[in-house]
Amino acid sequence: MVKRTSLAGDGCPVARALDVIGDWWSMLIIRDALTGRRRFGEFQKNLGLAKNILSARLRMLVDEGILATVPASDGSAYQEYILTDKGRGVFPILVALRQWSEEFDAHPDGIETILVDRENREPVQKLQLRARDGRLLAAGDVELKSRPSAKRARHAAA
């Protein structure tokens, strides 16, 4: 098995995020936690994931502050996994992935669920990136700009 390279020190925030939540099992665990699953057995049953892999992913998600462990809500000796604020922050990423798949999947009829607003039961509007003045932005409308503090850090290290 090839050892995974860490991207934690990369200057790109996308690479840093992928270092934490980039493997599919972690994203699926977070998805399940967002839908209310809290117990090891619930994750294992829904994902069909080997227990050792699930244990490792849950431990990593707890270590990264995405999940926290709490005593079981039923008072049993078990523990449950709950999302932290950092974990709930993954929600728009999962919505974006879902909407991308709904738009570009080769077999959209095989998608079994739609995301709806609980209040009115209507499908959720597609995520949009907007400028501060409200304009809709596409990839060609944005660019990356170096942060002044990042430039100073690079020169200091040289």
Image (cartoon, rainbow, N blue to C red):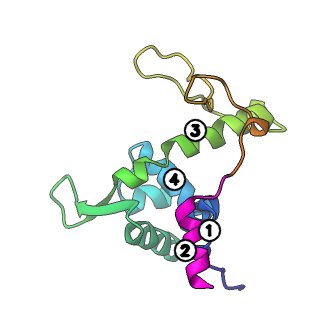
Q: Which residue is mark 2?
A: 153
Quadrant (top left, top right, bottom left, bottom right) of the C terminus: bottom right
First along the sequence among labels 3 and 1: 1
* Crowd band around label 2 with a 10 angstrom C-alpha radius: few (<14), some (14–19), many (20+): few
Magenta-colored span? 145-158
Q: Earlier in the sequence, mark 2 or mark 3?
A: 3
Question: Which is more N-terminal, label 2 or label 1?
Answer: 1
Q: How far, Cα to Cα, is label 4 from label 2?
A: 45 Å
The disc label shown at residue 11, or none: 1
Q: Position of residue 19 (x, y in %)?
A: 58, 68
Disc 2 to disc 3, C-alpha distance: 35 Å
Q: For the residues carrying marks 1 and 4, which lies nearer the camera in this image? A: 1
Nearest to viewer (mark 1 / mark 2): 2
Name the spot of residue 109 as percent of width and height, x first.
Answer: 76, 30
Tell me how far mark 4 sits from mark 3, CA to CA. 19 Å
The amino acid type of the residue labelled 3 equals: Val
Q: How far apart are the alpha carbons under marks 1 and 2?
A: 11 Å
Residue position marked by numbered label 4 in the rendering = 46
**Mark 1 or 4 closer to N-term?**
1
The amino acid marked with disc number 4 is Asn
Residue at 31% x, 62% y: name it.
68
Q: Main secondary structure of the magenta part?
A: helix
